[in-house]
Image: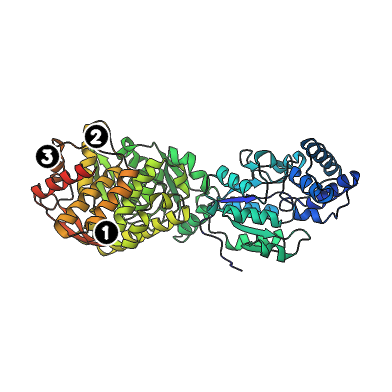
C-alpha cells in the first residue's frame, strides 16, 4: 500500500451512507421489505452492492432482473417513496466511528469537503449539520437530485469536483461501495475504499481502489499520520524554531480578512500583537513603518522577538524594514500571500518603503529567518495577479533552470494544478536563495535576477504615462521578450526560444501593449535611467546564451535596442 498522502489534493469528495452514517443495514432492510411487499424476493445483503446508485436505478435493476421489464416512472416514484418511509421508520442512524476524525483531519489541512451521495433521504441530509457541524456547507453537497446518472457513472464526482473548484485529479474520493469506487476512478480521482459493510476487500481491489482500509477509524489514523502539514502548522514550525520572546503579526486589511483566518490554529500567533496596514502602494510609507515600530515598542519586543509578515510585497517590504531597524535588527518570518511576493519580494532580503514619490527609496538588506511558501493563499487572487507573479517564475527558469522554464511554458497546466504550482514556487525560491547567498548585496551574480526588468521597467513606466498602468509582472513579461530578442541577435540564443515564448506564453496570457515608432525613443530613454545601470545613461542588460545560461553586464548599443524593439513590435 502506498502510504503517502497525494501532494496535489485540494478537495475531499465524501460519500454519506456507510461512510458518515452506519445506515446501509437500514437501507438494505428497507429495500428488502419494500420489494417483498411487491412479491419480489431479494437478499438484503445484495443492496450493499448497489450502494451509490439512485433509487430509481436500483428499482429498475430489480424489475429488469425479476420481472423482465423496466419499472415505469410512476412505479419508480411510488416504490422509492415507500422505501424511504421504511428507512425513516427503522430508527436512528448512528455516525460511523472515526468519521468525525476523518473530517477534522481534512478541515485542519484546509481541504474542501463536498458531500457526494446517491441518496435523496432528507432524514440523513438534515442530520449532517448536527452530527458534523461545519463539515459540509449547503453549496457543497451533491445528492440524487443533482445528477442524471448516478454511480457508477462518474457524473456525481465530476459535479463534486466542480463545486469544490478543483480538477478531478486534485480530489480524493472516500467510498465504502464498489460502485462508488468505480465512479471515483472513472472521474479521475484518487479513490479510497473503507470496508464498513459486508462486501469483501477483493471487490474493491477489482475496482482499482488506490487505498483500502478496514474501518473509518483506521482511515482516520492514517490521515492524521500522513496529511501534509497545514499552512498554520508550517508557520507554527517556522516561528517556534526561533524561540521568540514575543511575536508581532504584520498584515494588511485585505489579507487579514481573507488569509489570516486560515492561521487560527497557529499556536505561535495566539498571543501575538497584530498590526494591520491599509492595502495599496500609497501606504508603503514611513507612517506605516512607524505604526509597526510603535506596536513593537508597546508590546515590549526585544532583540529576541520576531515579526511575522503575512501579505504581499508591500507587507514583506515594510515589515522587513521595521524588523531590520528596530533595536538594530530583529528576526522576521515571511508568509507571502501573492505569487509575486512568494517568488520575489519575500526572499532575497530587500526591504524598504517609498519616500518623496520614489519607490523603495529608503531600505535595507535584511534576510528573513524563514519563508513559508504555499499556494493556498493564492486562491484569493485574481488570475491577473497570479500571472503577474508568474512572469517572475518564468524569468527565474530562464536564468537558472531550463527544465523548470520548459515546464512553466505550459501555463494553464501549471496554474490548474496547485501541487505543481507550489513545487515550481519552491524551486524558484531555492534558486533565488542560492543566488542571494553568493551575492547578498547585489555586486555581481545577483544581477542575473534583473533579466527582463530593464525593458520591463520601461514598459511599466510608459504604461503609467498613458493612464493604463500595467502590473509589474505584466511589464516584465513583455520585457522578457525584448531581452530574449537581444539575446538572439547578440548572444546567439536560438530563435525558436524567442518565438516559443512569444506565441505560447506572452500573446495568449498577457495583455498586449501597443508600441508605436514614436514610443521607441522614450522606451530607450527610460531604460537609460534604470536604477540598475552601472553607467548612467547606458542601459545594462542580463542576456541569455541559452535557457539557464545567463550573461550579466551586457551593454547593447542604442541601435541594437532600437532593432530589438522593432522586432518586438512586429511579433506582437
Give the Cα separation between the discs numbered 3 and 2: 17 Å
SS at circle 3: helix
Which residue position holds label 2?
464
Task: Please tell me how crowded label 3 is: few (under 14), some (14-19), or many (20+) other residues with Cα within 10 Å.
Answer: some
Which residue position holds label 3?
521
Residue at x-position 50% and y-position 53%:
231
SS at circle 1: helix
Residue 152, image x and y in percent?
Answer: 67, 52
Residue 127, image x and y in percent?
Answer: 74, 42
Task: Please tell me how crowded label 1 is: few (under 14), some (14-19), or many (20+) other residues with Cα within 10 Å.
Answer: many
In the displayed structure, would residue 455 be above or below residue 542?
Answer: above
Q: Quadrant of the C terminus?
A: top left
499, 62: nearer the viewer = 62
Q: Quadrant of residue 438?
A: bottom left
The furthest residue to the bottom:
1
SS at circle 2: helix
Residue at x-position 33% and y-position 47%:
317
Q: Is residue 178 left or right of residue 417?
A: right
Q: Which labelled disc corresponds to residue 550?
A: none
232, 147: nearer the viewer = 147
**Residue 544 appears in the figure:** yes
Q: Is residue 131 left or right of residue 84?
A: left
347, 431: nearer the viewer = 431
Q: Which labelled disc corresponds to residue 399?
A: 1
Amino acid at each position: 500500500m502506498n502510504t503517502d498522502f497525494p501532494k496535489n489534493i485540494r478537495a475531499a469528495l465524501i460519500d454519506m451512507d456507510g461512510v458518515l452514517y452506519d445506515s446501509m443495514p437500514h437501507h438494505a432492510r428497507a429495500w428488502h421489505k419494500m420489494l417483498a411487499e411487491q412479491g419480489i424476493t431479494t437478499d438484503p445483503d445484495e443492496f450493499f452492492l448497489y450502494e451509490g446508485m439512485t433509487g430509481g436505478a436500483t428499482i429498475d435493476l430489480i424489475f429488469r432482473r425479476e420481472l423482465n421489464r423496466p419499472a415505469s416512472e410512476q412505479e419508480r416514484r411510488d416504490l422509492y417513496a415507500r422505501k424511504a418511509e421504511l428507512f425513516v421508520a427503522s430508527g436512528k442512524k448512528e455516525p460511523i466511528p472515526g468519521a468525525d476524525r476523518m473530517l477534522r483531519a481534512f478541515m485542519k489541512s484546509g481541504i474542501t469537503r463536498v458531500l457526494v451521495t446517491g441518496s435523496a433521504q432528507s432524514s440523513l441530509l438534515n442530520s449532517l449539520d448536527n452530527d458534523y457541524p461545519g463539515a459540509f456547507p449547503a453549496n457543497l453537497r451533491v445528492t440524487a437530485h443533482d445528477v442524471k446518472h448516478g454511480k457508477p457513472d462518474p457524473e456525481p464526482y465530476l459535479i463534486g469536483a466542480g463545486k469544490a473548484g478543483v480538477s478531478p485529479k486534485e480530489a480524493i474520493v472516500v467510498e465504502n461501495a464498489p460502485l462508488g469506487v468505480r465512479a471515483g476512478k472513472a472521474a479521475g480521482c484518487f479513490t479510497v475504499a473503507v470496508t464498513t459493510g459486508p462486501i469483501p476487500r477483493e471487490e474493491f481491489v477489482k475496482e482499482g481502489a488506490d487505498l483500502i482500509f478496514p474501518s473509518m477509524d483506521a482511515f482516520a489514523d492514517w490521515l492524521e499520520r500522513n496529511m501534509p502539514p497545514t499552512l498554520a502548522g508550517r508557520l507554527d514550525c517556522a516561528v517556534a524554531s526561533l524561540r521568540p520572546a514575543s511575536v508581532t503579526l504584520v498584515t494588511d486589511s485585505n489579507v487579514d480578512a481573507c488569509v489570516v483566518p486560515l492561521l487560527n490554529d497557529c499556536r505561535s500567533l495566539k498571543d501575538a500583537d497584530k498590526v494591520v496596514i491599509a492595502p495599496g502602494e500609497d501606504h508603503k510609507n514611513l507612517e506605516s513603518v512607524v505604526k509597526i515600530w510603535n506596536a513593537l515598542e508597546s508590546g515590549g519586543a526585544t532583540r529576541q522577538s520576531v515579526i511575522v509578515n503575512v501579505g504581499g510585497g508591500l507587507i514583506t517590504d515594510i515589515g522587513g524594514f521595521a524588523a531590520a531597524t528596530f533595536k538594530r535588527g530583529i528576526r522576521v518570518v515571511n508568509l507571502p500571500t501573492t505569487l509575486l511576493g512568494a517568488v520575489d519580494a519575500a526572499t532575497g532580503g530587500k526591504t524598504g518603503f517609498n519616500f518623496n514619490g520614489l519607490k523603495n527609496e529608503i531600505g535595507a538588506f535584511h534576510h528573513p529567518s524563514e519563508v513559508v511558501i504555499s499556494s493556498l493563499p493564492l486562491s484569493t487572487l485574481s488570475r491577473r495577479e497570479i500571472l503577474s507573479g508568474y512572469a517572475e517564475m518564468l524569468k527565474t527558469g530562464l536564468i537558472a533552470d531550463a527544465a523548470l522554464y520548459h515546464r512553466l511554458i505550459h501555463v494553464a497546466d501549471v496554474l490548474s494544478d496547485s501541487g505543481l504550482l507550489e513545487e515550481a514556487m519552491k524551486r524558484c525560491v531555492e534558486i533565488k536563495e542560492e543566488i542571494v547567498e553568493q551575492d547578498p548585496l547585489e555586486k555581481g551574480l545577483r544581477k542575473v535576477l534583473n533579466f527582463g526588468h530593464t525593458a520591463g521597467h520601461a514598459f511599466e513606466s510608459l504604461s503609467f504615462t498613458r493612464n493604463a498602468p500595467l502590473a509589474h509582472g505584466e511589464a516584465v513579461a513583455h520585457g522578457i521578450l525584448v531581452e530574449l530578442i537581444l539575446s538572439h541577435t547578440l548572444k546567439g540564443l536560438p530563435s525558436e526560444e524567442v518565438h516559443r515564448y512569444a506565441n505560447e506564453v506572452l500573446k495568449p496570457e498577457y495583455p498586449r501593449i501597443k508600441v508605436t515608432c514614436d514610443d521607441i525613443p522614450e522606451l530607450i530613454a527610460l531604460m537609460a535611467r534604470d536604477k540598475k545601470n552601472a553607467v548612467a545613461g547606458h542601459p545594462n542588460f542580463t542576456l541569455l546564451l541559452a535557457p539557464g545560461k545567463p550573461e550579466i553586464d551586457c551593454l547593447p548599443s542604442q541601435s541594437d535596442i532600437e532593432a530589438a524593439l522593432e522586432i518586438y513590435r512586429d511579433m506582437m
